[in-house]
Amino acid sequence: MKIRHFNALQDNYMYLITSDKSNECAVVDPAEPAELVKTIKNEGLKLTTILTTHHHYDHAGGNSKMLEMMGAEKDQIQVVGGDKSLQALTHPVKDNEKLQIGELEVTCLSTPCHTAGHVCYVVSDGREQAVFTGDTLFIGGCGKFFEGTAAQMQSSLQKLASLDPKTLVYCGHEYTKKNLEFAATVEPDNQDLKSKQANLKSVTIPSTIGDELKFNPFMRTNQANVQAFTGKKDPVECMGELRERKNNF
Ligand SMILES: [Zn+2]
């Protein structure tokens, strides 16, 4: 499979996922769809699926426009998501539901907390696997708890943590630099974090699940260092305290 990112709005990432074996493709969170539509048309791709991570306008706000811009093809495009209120939704999904894009298999993971209906999408071509994490998991951080609790974020991130460590992570925003600055206050002696910070480029996607487990404090609430920083031994309390500190960072 081939995964390309496109910039939208301030610091959002949209993604185009294409199959190697068919001309079918999917997009993730097409908030500003013009460039995506241009690429799809130029390359003669067949868009079958719009994957929406959550209802916030900077992720779901371009769904109707994308369909409109696809013209006559729009009736063959399914709009997927976990929140009934999503713009132009045609295909509500449940946890662990599977979808197909050409030979690519998509697994929908329910990851509530940032929003109640947030979904992450695991896409696999049998050799390589990627996860589109929206505003649940960022590189070095996680989303704010707008519609959920620390316990929900803990269980959502643990669900992602259980994926194959080689799984590529494509998140919804370029927040990495600031996230890592906060992470360095949590674990100033974390060598993996130091080398990540030293080699940072302007576009930081993709990461991997294995790397996030090494330096993302929100993925490390079971680690003594992170628990010591927050003064909380319980991973859920540690998660809540970390988010509080990050909100005020
Ligand atoms: Zn959001």
Image (cartoon, grey):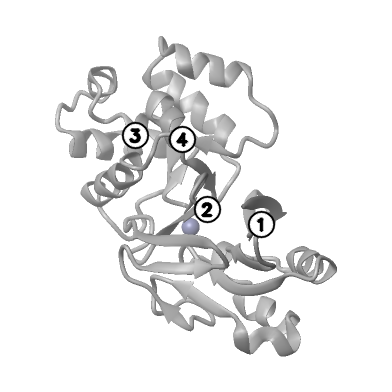
Separation of disc 2 and disc 1 at Cα?
A: 9 Å
Q: Which residue is mark 1?
A: 20
Separation of disc 4 and disc 3 at Cα?
A: 15 Å
Left or right of 74 on screen, residue 184: left
Left or right of 168 on screen, residue 165: left
Three-letter residue code for mark 3: Met
Per the rendering, the mark at residue 219 is 3
- The front one of 142 and 80 is 80
In this rendering, the label closer to the viewer, 1 or 3: 1
Residue depicted at 66% across the width and 57% down the height: 20
Instruction: Mark 1: give few (<14), some (14-19) or many (20+) Cα within 10 Å.
Output: some
The percent position of residue 91, horizontal first and vertical second, equals 44, 80
* Ligand 1 within 8 Å of the CB at mark 2: no
The percent position of residue 49, horizontal first and vertical second, equals 57, 72
Per the rendering, the mark at residue 125 is 2
Sooner in the amino-acid sequence: mark 1 or mark 4: 1
Left or right of 174 on screen, residue 231: left
Determine whether 240 is above or below 33 in the image. Answer: above
- The front one of 32 and 2 is 2
Sooner in the amino-acid sequence: mark 3 or mark 2: 2
Residue depicted at 50% across the width and 32% down the height: 179
Determine whether 164 is above or below 155 in the image. Answer: above
Sooner in the amino-acid sequence: mark 2 or mark 1: 1
Regarding residue 55, the answer to whether it shows in the image is no
Separation of disc 1 and disc 3 at Cα?
A: 32 Å
Per the rendering, the mark at residue 171 is none
- The front one of 21 and 19 is 21
Kindly indicate whether the residue at mark 1 contacts the one at mark 2 (C-beta within 8 angstroms): yes
Three-letter residue code for mark 1: Asp
In this rendering, the label closer to the viewer, 1 or 4: 1
* Tag 3 secondary structure: helix
